[in-house]
Image (cartoon, rainbow, N blue to C red):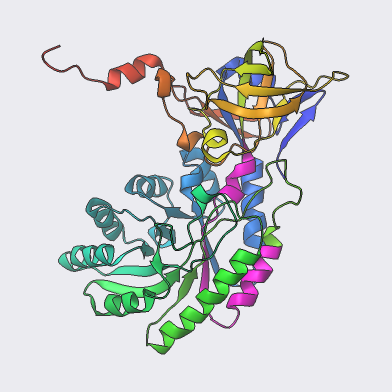
């Protein structure tokens, strides 16, 4: 569910008229709904209200400070994958004891920051990382709490670029070898083993991969306890998919996911840690863009808009489908098959291919739906196109939570060599 609906033929974000908002901030821009963010977090947490849990929002999905703060106010912790995200989480006043640090390539500086902040847990991805962390923590006279990310070699049945739980993926330590890594961790100074971590991928639309993975995880926890490790939490990652508007069957509801998780973990007595990202923010955001031209080619019609692949890379990077709606409804017109493309000088610059829609007119506004996750955070400045604004709405009010950069700002980042 989201809070983007038509009112008198005009799409609104909660109580905000998107035509009026576009006139105020100019296109393209991202728009996020506070009510949707809060509702999605509440639905997820209520599904686990009868067990001890910690829900750490996966900031990589959308790291706008206003989004993070909105969820922090709901009680969310944070799953971070960089030192920058850790600093963002702390800037939003998320307590250190609600922060998990994931990611395969943590630098020494990032591990120093995590140790200094005293965060809840560092999800270790390799023996070299574990040994580096030990030397840092011991050198400071501190203890770093860790879990080891295990790779179960399970097909998450998702896009290959967002699968993380198969043997050929770079993430985690093979579950067949993870026991010896735990034995190493128990011997290292400055290290306290407190949990186990597993995350098998993103935009997972079936429960079976989770079920298979968590059954392996539960057995592994029992094995570790038999070896004498004190496992107080299991980090089950995130990955639950959302509807993007073209699915034959919708992804599982959080309540169905929760029942499956509780069956797999009911006798372990562990705190359950989750790292949801997309399922919280994906359908809480849209990208609003303006039609520049219609161009009729030999075989198809191109709808050229002012948002490009640098603003939303998911369609070309992941072959992702995003529903596209007119901001003003047009009745009685005949749909046609079109490509919705941007102004970037690349053939891969598109938002939709072979899409059946009523051809809009130049100046019309379109809303690219389900763009709250992995939209703005993956945006770039290719073709010297500045990053676009982000807006947060709450009922009938809105706030600019990231202003539009100007070309002059991009140029000012460069420095001429002294001989130029």
Of 250 and 57, nearer the camera is 250
Q: Give the residue displayed 69% in from the left and 28% down from the top.
A: 354
Compared with residue 123, is residue 323 higher up or lower down, i.e. above or below? above
In the figure, is residue 416 to the left or right of 156?
left
Query: Hey, which quadrant is residue 415 in on the image?
Result: top left
Q: Residue 24's spot in the image, x, y percent?
A: 59, 16
Most distant residue in the left direction: 419
For the point 67% across and 42% down, which residue is it?
A: 244
Q: How many marks?
A: 0
Tell me if residue 93 can be seen: yes
Q: Is residue 201 left or right of residue 127?
A: right
Where residue 100 sits in the image (x, y, percent)? 41, 59
Is 361 in front, or is 285? 361
**Rendered view: 18 above or below 40:** above
List the single residue furthest toward the right: 332
Query: Could you tell me residue 195's position as x and y percent?
Result: 42, 73
Instruction: Please report the residue visible at 41 percent of the width from the left and 24 percent of the height from the top.
Output: 382
- The quadrant of the rendering that contains the C terminus is top left
Task: Give, as a single range, the part of the protein colored magenta.
Answer: 256-285
Establish if 48 lies above or below 282: below
């Amino acid at each position: 569910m989201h809070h983007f609906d038509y009112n008198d033929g005009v799409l609104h974000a909660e109580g905000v008229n998107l035509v009026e908002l576009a006139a105020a901030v100019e296109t393209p821009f991202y728009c996020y709904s506070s009510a949707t963010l809060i509702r999605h977090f509440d639905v997820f947490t209520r599904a686990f209200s009868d067990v001890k849990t910690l829900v750490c929002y996966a900031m990589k999905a959308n790291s706008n400070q206003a989004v993070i703060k909105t969820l922090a106010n709901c009680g969310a912790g944070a799953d971070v994958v960089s030192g920058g995200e850790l600093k963002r989480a702390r800037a939003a006043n998320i307590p250190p004891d609600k922060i998990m640090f994931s990611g395969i390539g943590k630098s020494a500086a990032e591990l120093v920051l995590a140790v200094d902040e005293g965060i809840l847990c560092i999800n270790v991805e390799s023996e070299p990382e574990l040994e580096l962390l030990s030397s840092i923590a011991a050198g400071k006279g501190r203890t770093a709490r860790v879990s080891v990310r295990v790779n179960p070699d399970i097909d998450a049945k998702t896009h290959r670029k967002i699968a993380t739980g198969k043997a050929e993926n770079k993430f985690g330590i093979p579950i067949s070898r993870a026991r010896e890594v735990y034995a190493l961790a128990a011997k290292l100074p400055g290290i306290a083993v407190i949990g186990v971590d597993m995350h098998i991928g993103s935009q997972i639309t079936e429960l079976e991969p989770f079920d298979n993975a968590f059954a392996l995880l539960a057995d592994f926890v029992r094995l570790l306890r038999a070896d004498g490790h004190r496992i107080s939490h299991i980090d089950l990652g995130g990955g639950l998919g959302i509807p993007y508007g073209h699915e034959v069957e919708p992804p599982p509801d959080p309540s169905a996911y929760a029942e499956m998780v509780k069956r797999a973990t009911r006798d372990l007595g562990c705190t359950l840690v989750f790292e949801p990202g997309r399922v919280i923010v994906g359908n809480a955001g849209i990208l609003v863009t303006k039609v520049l031209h219609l161009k009729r080619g030999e075989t198809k019609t191109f709808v050229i808009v002012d948002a490009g692949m640098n603003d939303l890379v998911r369609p070309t990077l992941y072959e992702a489908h995003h529903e596209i709606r007119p901001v003003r409804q047009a009745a009685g017109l005949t749909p046609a098959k079109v490509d919705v493309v941007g102004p970037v000088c690349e053939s891969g610059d598109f938002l939709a291919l072979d899409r059946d829609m009523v051809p809009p007119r130049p100046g019309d506004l379109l809303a690219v739906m389900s763009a709250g996750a992995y939209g703005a955070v993956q945006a770039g400045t290719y073709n010297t196109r500045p990053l676009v604004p982000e807006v947060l709405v709450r009922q009938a009010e809105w706030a600019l939570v990231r202003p539009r950069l100007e070309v002059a700002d991009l140029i000012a980042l460069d420095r001429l060599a002294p001989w130029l």
